[in-house]
Image: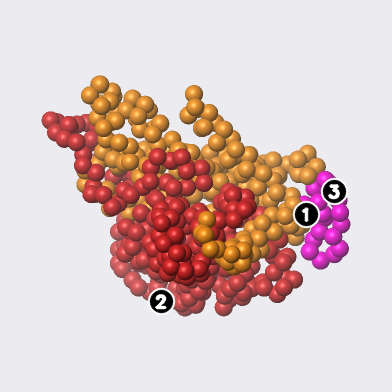
Amino acid sequence: MLPNRSRTSVLVFLLPPLLLYCAAVLFPILQSLFLSFFSWNGISDMEFVGLANYVRMLTADDIFWRSFFNALIYLAICLVLQLGGALVVASLLTSLRRGRELIKTLYLLPAVISTVAIAFLFVRIYSIDPVGLLNQLLHWVGLGSFERAWLSDVNTVLAAVSAPEGWRFTGLYMLIIYAALIAVPKELEEAAVLDGASKWTLFTKIRFPYIRPVWITTTIMATTYGLRGFDIPYLMTNGGPGQSSELLTTYMYKTAFTSTDFGYASTISVFIVIECLVAVGLILFMLKRKADS
Amino acid sequence: MIAQTAPVHATPTTRPPAPVPKRRRRKPSLYRTLSRVLIMLIVIVQVYPLAWLFLTSLRTEQDFATGDPFALPSSLTWENYARAFETGDLGRNILNSFIVTMGANVLIVLLGMMAAYAIQVLGFRFSKFVRGLFLVGIIVPVQIALVPLFIDYSTVNLLDTYQSMIIPLAGFALPMSIYLFSSFFEYIPRETYEAASLDGAGPYRIFGLITLPLSLNTVVTVILVNSIFIWNDFIFANTFVLSEELKTIPLGLQNYIGAMGKVDWTATFAAVCVTITPLLLVFLVLNKAMIQGLESGANKG
């Protein structure tokens, strides 16, 4: 603490940021919680309905559950592409002698591009008429039977809208993990190599435990970003065909701004927040416990 | 946030390229060759779509509709760019994105620094609690704010303004900014402050004369990292902005979807190329600083 600070000076520095944060983040959270107990279309009077929205969401809304499970699959695909891809590339990169900086830059490139542009790009990559990149590639390697309109097929659409999100940010997580990997003390690795450790043992016994704290942070980042994924599915398919690529976020958005059912939409967004908190709690619980054992 | 326990405080880019021990000199090992090939493949997957985007923007419509997508364009044309500028108001969109990005960044940097200063340097009784309150904002998804803000904006007539985008963008980025600034302020030695205090400097002068000038590097980091997300923001702009004059790049691009859902793809790709250029240039020029920022940011928190 600074010796001659005054109460006013603390307030002068603290109040403006706190005000913005309350206006944009904290107050809206409370407001959503409040609205979730009402039925309201934005025009007529608000009607208090108690827990009815929650009961409807959890017991009577098939689309909600469909979106929930879709969101979990979307999250799983994003996590595999982002964290798995990031870990593999970061490890490979440490064995490279030259060109690391160049590869880092190239790898991060998609993260700079807006989701609208990415959605346009991937619509063309998946398209069948005119033949897009993916179908052409399948044709060349002799898997022509798999050619299809990826975004209109109910079996492939969810994976097809998840992949661009994974593709986009894998470079970001790679950078973070790479920075952690090259901070692993060289003496540790060399000692292990002298003892005859294989590449795999080196990774599982020395490197990974060392970067575990960073791994926890990245997992939390990727998970919370995955759970709030919205732009790409919304822009590419708007949840369709049917509900086959509907996520909780796109469902919430449509409930709010297409059906103008503000109360029910707030109920869904409260659920999304709880889901994020639970996910972070679970990650901390699982990864921390493993670290202790 | 969590990784305060992290043993790594990344300073990777400042050290020379990590010396690789010479143990593998004997043979060009299979492992090394394999990993090179794999890296090349992955980099191609990351970069090729973008190169393709650019090539397509130079194709004739005819060539695009019929040709093999992997083939090089049979002839190059700038016509798509002309059509792109005719269809939309790209200059306006870029200007709007610029205004929103600047506005939000000013708030994020200034307020983030102030809050971190109050919490980390000045200190007060409930500072731990306030810090925790801010950190919750890192986890909370932005979608929760859409309905409440939409309602609040319409009561105070803020819908369809620059502020309607800037406020939530800055608010949701504030926690990370506060976190980065407080982790940096930890490294400023207490003695510096105590010496200044003995010389009679109050908290305001210390902020202006010591803390602010010392944290310029962190300011750059915070701005670079946030600009990527703010420049490309879609959800707030899409929810709160309706009028053409205020549309940012992501919304402007949507105008290229024609009335009947028919898309002039080559012109659209030309527009995409135009709109990603500003940020791409900044990224390529400053990529060292940006990469360092991203690495250190997350490895600290």
Chain identifier of the residue bearing label 2 in the image: B
Vertical placement of residue A199 versus A39, above or below: above
* Residue located beneath label 1 in the image: A34
From this viewpoint, which residue is outermost toward the left?
A: B26
Label pair 3/2, CB-CB below 8 angstroms: no
Density class for disc 1 (Cα within 10 Å; few <14, some 14-19, many ≥20) is some
User: Label 3 amino acid?
Assistant: Gly
Res B171 seen here? yes
Density class for disc 2 (Cα within 10 Å; few <14, some 14-19, many ≥20) is few
Which residue is depicted at the point 40% across and 31% down?
A209
Vertical placement of residue A200 versus B103, above or below: above
- Image colour assigned to chain B: red
Residue A113 position, x and y percent, is: 44, 59
Pick the front one: B5 or A213: B5
Chain identifier of the residue bearing label 3 in the image: A
Query: How far is disc 3 from disc 2 in space, using C-alphas?
Result: 57 Å
Residue A48 inside the magenta-drawn segment = yes
Number of marks present in the image shown: 3
Chain identifier, orange in the render: A
Residues shaded magenta: A34-53
Which residue is depicted at the point 26% across and 32% down?
A187
* Residue located beneath label 2 in the image: B82
* Residue located beneath label 3 in the image: A50
Which residue is depicted at the point 17% across and 32% down?
B24
Query: Mark 3 or mark 1, which has the lower sequence index?
Result: 1
Pick the front one: B271 or A131: B271
- Report helix, strand or loop for mark 2: helix
